[in-house]
Image: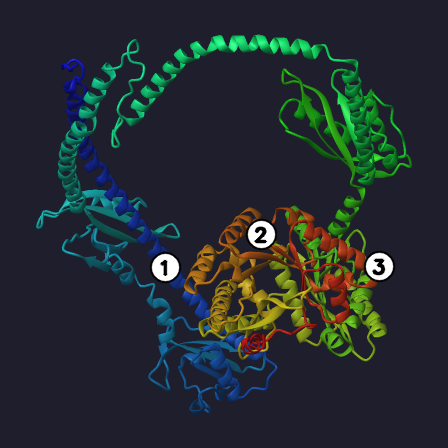
């Protein structure tokens, strides 16, 4: 049977919609082009404003930078002069030469009060006498103590230009310091205006830029084919003088080119100090729009042609074929007919559905035929059922015996269930919500020592065992579960036993729904968690107290001092550091050193009251907080008493070694309004006290420059180490406690050609942010070393790297990790990142996200120094880590005979969270054997090896 045109109206279904779509696309293209031109011009306007304002801000900041450089040069001259006068070293020319080299200045001269050079870093200057009318003579005849010349002048003894400063001594002699003009110009050079203007030369959209002062004197210019001159008559000039910017579209009369002129004032201290004019070309924007219109029209035309061809091949022809096949369907005469489906048929799915419908229709006809047979079979089944209902007495007895057997098994299961409940120190409960009664198992008697009425009123029973606040919270949990807000009931409550003691129960359960989806009953269990709560409190105590001395630790100090500073309270902070304590450890051993710290902790506890608080800061340092006290005589009285107590107690514990202490004191908020500033100033005062002879206390004052000088020197060494790759790494083996084999290494940082301890330079690196480049050097060197071991065919063992909060917070940290493992083609598992719990004192959410990302990259993460002050079960539950490293101080305390059970509990608790445990600082075999016995995973310390250079590690690996 054929098809006429009415079956498929190709013109109405395909051609007309295609034409309408083409016209719509072209119309939208024309309209969008019109508005596109305006949008591009507006974009050019804001583009010009943005780059002009950005350059204006740079010029404003450059003005400030030039002033700051002049001020820095003056301060540098003053500091050098004061350092020479305050120095205890005997004056000499060689001393001045050393200072000139250390401070990188050209000239240092020591004049007598008569104007004769006594000492100089330049030998030929010695003996020079100041002539009349010389600039130095003005300073000699003045009453000024410190003077810095405003301008650079030529040296009278050479052709060099310098800037000079003078510092007068108490005896009338004075110091002259000179800095070369070349050094000053180098600092100022990168802030010149022409350089800033020239930076726009490489921007293809900028055609000119001019910088004028407020009187229209041209200071800098940049031109690329087009020019413009700002005059006093220009409206934009008048707006700029009124602190307003202006934008104007103009055309170059010579070239005919169009551009956007942006005029922005440069403001400093609310005065207009300059005017910046920038021209941005518009020709590029117009050209882009024209090209877009032509290209879009051509693409639309070609696309329509392709669509017409595609529709003819893929839709029109197959649709005609489908119509022919559908008309052939005859349900009356030919039930076996099915549509033909070809391999590349576009209507394959539709034809399959039609064939399935035909299959089901055929099946219905056949099912009608079979229904008669099924009715007959049903009659036979009914007859068989009648026979089963007439069972004999013997069969019924057999069924009864089987039921009795099942009853005995159920009774046996009930007994096993009761044993399990009692063994786990738990029980079950049930609440009937219809009559509000509760039924509690008899196990409650074992826990509370009192039996409760079965099927008693819920509120009466809860009143007998719960505190009011816990009862209300528990009932609220029940209600939220009943209303569908909570899937389960899970709540911990305090209960009172028969002796009035507080115990902890974990209540857990859920509701049973009826056919209508309504909760009618609540079922659950209760578990006695009192022992677990005690252990949790013990660990929480450990988190906020020092394990050796029993004093509050740094974590508790941070909480208290931040609360004080937040309230704006006044008080004093003392930083106490023991003198010669290292000698105690080196000569008499760490056991004796620990005993001394314990004794001092006991002494400090006797001083404590509601105003005086003691904390162990770490090592041999203690912190003392005196609240609501800023009177120097009272604070001094405390300080003297503490120094005397330390000296007296040390004489009994450590004989033959003079152990005293130095105390640095800072007041808040006078000396600092934040923790970092307050600690730094107390630390500075303490180091000054050590410098002046130990066994004394000092208050912080602003002239304490010696300690700061040392910090500057260490900072300089750190910068040099980064620039010249003078960072050295040692590797300490970490051993599997069971097998005794090396499981991994820890990379420990040292400085080449320097004996400065990491404990001293790491805090300074943290404060100056040098820890970030140093950290990257360490990571790269570790990756390079692992790659070398891999090339040598050694078995690859993970190397752990200590990472601080500042490193993790750095935006480049994650990318650097990825780049290094890709560069050296390493598996991320070969590097372990070690963090400390102090990292959580930073922005916790940000740090957590970074740690999650590090884990996704494949690196393992370990929590280092566990037990030094921040340890908490809370951290262990949400930190995504693989390993816990127990600090040496924790191991030393809890590996004693009376405390081994505590250490075993700590390790079991950590391992229950699927974490591995490493014990650090193990130095003797006895502690190693204890750790093996209680199940510690890994051990690190001198009992196996000290930290070794890579060459010795290579020898160690070669022996395997």
On the image, which quarter does residue 724 sit in? bottom left
Residues packed near mark 1 inside 10 Å, few (<14), some (14 to 19) or many (20 plus): some
Q: Residue at x 32, y 24 (%)?
A: 352
- 182 left or right, relative to 27: right
Mark linked to residue 86: none
**Mark sitting earlier along the chain (1/3):** 1
Compared to residue 823, the image places residue 587 above or below, namely: below
| Distance of label 1 from label 2 (alpha carbons) | 36 Å
Residue 727 appears at what percent x and percent y? Answer: 51, 73
- Residue on which the image places disc 2: 842
| Distance of label 3 from label 2 (alpha carbons) | 34 Å
Residue 929 appears at what percent x and percent y? Answer: 76, 66
Q: In terms of depth relative to the viewer, which is nearer, 751 or 418?
A: 418
Residue 222 appears at what percent x and percent y? Answer: 21, 58
- 403 left or right, relative to 501: left
- Asked which secondary structure carries label 2, the reply is loop
| Distance of label 1 from label 3 (alpha carbons) | 59 Å
Q: In terms of depth relative to the viewer, which is nearer, 830 or 387?
A: 387
- Residue on which the image places disc 3: 606
Mark linked to residue 63: 1
Given the current orientation, which residue lies at the most extreme left position? 254
Q: Is residue 568 visible?
A: no
């Amino acid at each position: 049977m054929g098809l006429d045109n009415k079956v498929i109206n190709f013109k109405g279904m395909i051609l007309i919609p295609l034409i309408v779509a083409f016209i719509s696309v072209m119309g939208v293209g024309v309209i969008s082009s019109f508005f596109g031109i305006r949008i591009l011009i507006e974009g050019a306007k804001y583009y010009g404003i943005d780059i002009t304002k950005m350059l204006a801000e740079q010029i404003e900041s450059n003005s400030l930078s030039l002033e700051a450089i002049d001020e820095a040069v003056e301060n540098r001259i003053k500091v050098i002069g004061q350092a020479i006068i305050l120095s205890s070293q005997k004056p000499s020319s060689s001393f001045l030469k050393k200072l000139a080299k250390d401070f990188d200045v050209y000239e240092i001269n020591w004049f007598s009060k008569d104007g004769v050079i006594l000492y100089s870093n330049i030998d030929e200057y010695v003996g020079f006498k100041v002539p009349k009318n010389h600039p130095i003579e003005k300073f000699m005849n003045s009453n000024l103590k410190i003077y810095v010349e405003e301008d650079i002048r030529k040296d009278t003894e050479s052709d060099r230009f310098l800037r000079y400063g003078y510092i007068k001594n108490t005896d009338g002699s004075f110091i002259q310091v000179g800095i070369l003009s070349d050094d000053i110009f180098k600092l100022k050079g990168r802030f010149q205006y022409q350089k800033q203007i020239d930076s726009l030369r490489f921007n293809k959209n900028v055609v000119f830029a001019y910088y004028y002062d407020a009187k229209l004197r041209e200071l800098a210019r940049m031109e690329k084919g087009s020019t413009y001159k700002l005059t006093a008559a220009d409206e934009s000039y008048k707006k700029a003088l009124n602190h307003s910017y202006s934008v104007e579209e103009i055309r170059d009369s010579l070239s005919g080119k169009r551009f956007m002129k942006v005029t922005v004032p440069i403001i400093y201290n609310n005065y207009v100090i300059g005017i910046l004019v920038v021209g941005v070309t518009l020709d590029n924007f117009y050209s882009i729009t024209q090209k877009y219109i032509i290209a879009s029209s051509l693409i639309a035309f070609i696309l329509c042609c392709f669509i017409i061809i595609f529709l003819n091949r893929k839709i029109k022809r197959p649709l005609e074929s489908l119509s022919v096949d559908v008309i052939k369907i005859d349900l009356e005469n030919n039930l076996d007919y099915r549509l033909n489906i070809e391999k590349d048929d576009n209507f394959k799915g539709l034809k399959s559905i039609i064939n399935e419908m035909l299959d089901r229709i055929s099946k219905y006809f056949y099912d009608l035929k079979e229904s008669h047979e099924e009715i007959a079979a049903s009659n036979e089944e009914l007859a068989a059922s009648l026979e089963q209902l007439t069972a004999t007495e013997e069969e019924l007895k057999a069924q009864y015996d089987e039921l009795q057997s099942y009853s005995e098994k159920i009774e046996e299961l009930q007994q096993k269930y009761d044993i399990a409940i009692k063994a786990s120190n738990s029980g079950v409960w049930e609440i009937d919500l219809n009559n509000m009664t509760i039924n509690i198992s008899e196990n409650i008697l074992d826990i509370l020592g009192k039996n409760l009425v079965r099927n008693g009123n819920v509120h009466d029973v809860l009143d007998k065992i719960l505190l009011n606040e816990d009862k209300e919270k528990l009932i609220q949990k029940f209600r939220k579960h009943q209303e569908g807000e909570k899937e389960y009931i899970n709540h911990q409550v305090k209960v009172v036993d028969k002796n009035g003691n507080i115990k902890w129960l974990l209540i857990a359960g859920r509701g049973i729904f009826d056919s209508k989806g309504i909760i009618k009953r609540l079922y659950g269990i209760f578990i006695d968690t009192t022992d677990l709560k005690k252990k949790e409190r013990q660990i929480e105590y450990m988190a906020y107290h020092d394990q050796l001395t029993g004093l509050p630790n740094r974590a508790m100090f941070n909480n208290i001092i931040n609360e004080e500073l937040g309230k704006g309270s006044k008080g004093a902070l003392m930083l106490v550091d023991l003198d010669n304590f290292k000698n105690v450890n080196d000569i008499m051993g760490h056991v004796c050193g620990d005993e001394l710290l314990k004794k001092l902790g006991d002494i400090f506890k006797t001083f404590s009251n509601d105003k005086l608080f003691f904390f162990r800061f770490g090592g041999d340092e203690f912190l003392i907080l005196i609240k609501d006290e800023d009177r120097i005589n009272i604070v001094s009285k405390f300080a003297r008493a503490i120094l005397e107590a330390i000296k007296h107690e040390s004489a009994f514990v450590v004989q033959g070694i003079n152990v005293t202490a130095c105390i640095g004191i800072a007041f808040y908020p006078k000396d600092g309004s934040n923790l970092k500033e307050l600690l730094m100033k107390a630390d500075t005062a303490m180091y000054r006290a050590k410098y002046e002879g130990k066994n004394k206390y000092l208050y912080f004052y602003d002239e304490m420059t010696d300690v700061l000088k040392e910090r500057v020197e260490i900072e300089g060494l750190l910068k040099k180490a980064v620039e010249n790759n003078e960072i050295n790494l040692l590797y300490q083996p970490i051993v599997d406690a069971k097998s005794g084999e090396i499981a991994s290494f820890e990379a420990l940082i040292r400085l080449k050609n320097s004996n400065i301890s990491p404990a001293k330079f790491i805090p300074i690196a943290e404060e100056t942010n040098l820890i970030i480049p140093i950290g990257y050097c360490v990571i790269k060197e570790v990756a390079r070393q692992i790659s070398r071991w891999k090339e040598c065919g050694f078995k690859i063992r993970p190397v752990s790297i200590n990472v601080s909060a500042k490193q993790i917070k750095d935006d480049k940290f994650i990318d650097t990790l990825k780049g290094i493992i890709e560069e050296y083609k390493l598996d991320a598992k070969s590097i372990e990142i070690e963090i400390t719990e102090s990292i959580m004192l930073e922005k916790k959410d940000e740090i957590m996200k970074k740690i999650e990302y590090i884990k996704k990259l494949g690196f393992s993460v370990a929590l280092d120094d566990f037990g030094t002050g921040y340890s908490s079960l809370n951290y262990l539950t949400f930190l995504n880590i693989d390993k816990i490293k127990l600090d040496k101080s924790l191991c030393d305390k809890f590996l004693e005979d009376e405390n081994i059970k505590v250490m075993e509990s700590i390790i079991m608790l950590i391992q229950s969270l699927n974490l591995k445990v490493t014990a650090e600082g193990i130095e003797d075999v006895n502690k190693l054997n204890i750790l093996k016995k209680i199940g510690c995973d890994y051990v690190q310390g001198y009992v196996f090896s000290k930290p070794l250079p890579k060459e010795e590690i290579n020898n160690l690996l070669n022996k395997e």
